[in-house]
Image (cartoon, rainbow, N blue to C red):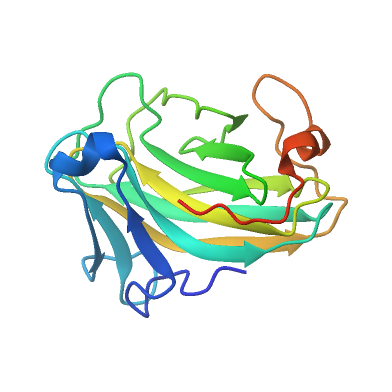
């Protein structure tokens, strides 16, 4: 479902999102050929100071009720730093209607705020992967990949793949289920980062 998942076509289908509080932090999105996970390229998110910023993919069509495996490979450099009590790297889904779920680097899925890291972001390529269920009434989702770092974060091979409904979904942190997200997920607009 994700186009240009390995950034082999440069920045096509991806765009930089920098919130107001990070505007002065020199946040950048470039393509790196320095040891990608696969192929010849990967995304590099880099900032001159601690910042929260993201790259966003164009909206992806989805079908309510589907189980989807979400996966991305990521790594940082030895000099990359993360402030205490931050999630480090996050995959955020914004469903049409505005409701979000967040997947942190350790594969914890949460509604509202992402869960903070318990260990440092690795310098070797590491995969985060979960299975989510598309809530009732949802027809599109936006996909954003967030960094909370100072220094480079590399991302490659991003995917959203439909899987058999018998594949168990990753539980939501704090309980609840994906169907309960429908109340605020119904709607016709698409919210992008």
126 w.r.t. 183: above or below: below
> 83 or 92: nearer the eye?
92
The correct choice, above or below, for 169 with respect to 86 in the image is below
Vertical side of 140 occupied by 182: above or below:
above
Q: Image point 21% across, 66% down: which residue?
A: 34
Q: Quadrant of residue 85?
A: top left
Drawn side of residue 62 relative to residue 71, left or right: right
Left or right of 66 in this view: 46: left
> Residue 15's x, y, as percent?
36, 63
12 relative position to 63: left or right = left
Task: Residue 124: tell me if it is visible.
Answer: no
Question: Residue 121 in the image: x percent, y percent?
Answer: 33, 37
On the rendered image, what quadrant is the N terminus found in?
A: bottom right
Q: Residue at x 72, y 32 (%)?
A: 171
Closer-to-camera residue (161/119): 161
Q: Is residue 62 visible?
A: yes
What's the residue at 52%, 44% (across, down)? 92
């Amino acid at each position: 479902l994700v186009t240009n998942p390995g950034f082999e076509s440069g920045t096509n289908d991806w765009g930089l999102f920098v919130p107001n509080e990070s505007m002065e932090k020199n946040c950048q999105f470039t393509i790196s050929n320095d040891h990608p996970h696969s192929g010849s390229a990967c995304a590099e998110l880099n900032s001159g100071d601690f910042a929260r910023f993201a790259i966003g993919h164009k909206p992806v069509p989805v079908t309510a009720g589907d189980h989807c495996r979400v996966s991305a490979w990521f790594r940082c450099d030895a000099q990359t730093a993360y402030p205490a009590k931050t999630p480090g790297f996050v995959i955020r889904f914004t469903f049409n209607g505005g409701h979000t779920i967040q997947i942190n680097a350790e594969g914890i899925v949460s509604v509202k705020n992402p869960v903070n890291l318990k260990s440092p972001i690795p310098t070797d390529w590491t995969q985060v992967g979960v299975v989510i269920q598309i809530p009732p009434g949802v027809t599109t989702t936006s996909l954003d990949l967030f960094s909370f770092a100072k220094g480079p974060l590399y991302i490659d091979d991003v995917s959203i793949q439909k899987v058999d409904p018998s594949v168990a979904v990753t539980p939501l942190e704090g309980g609840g289920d994906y169907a309960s997200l429908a109340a605020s997920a119904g709607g016709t607009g698409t919210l992008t980062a």
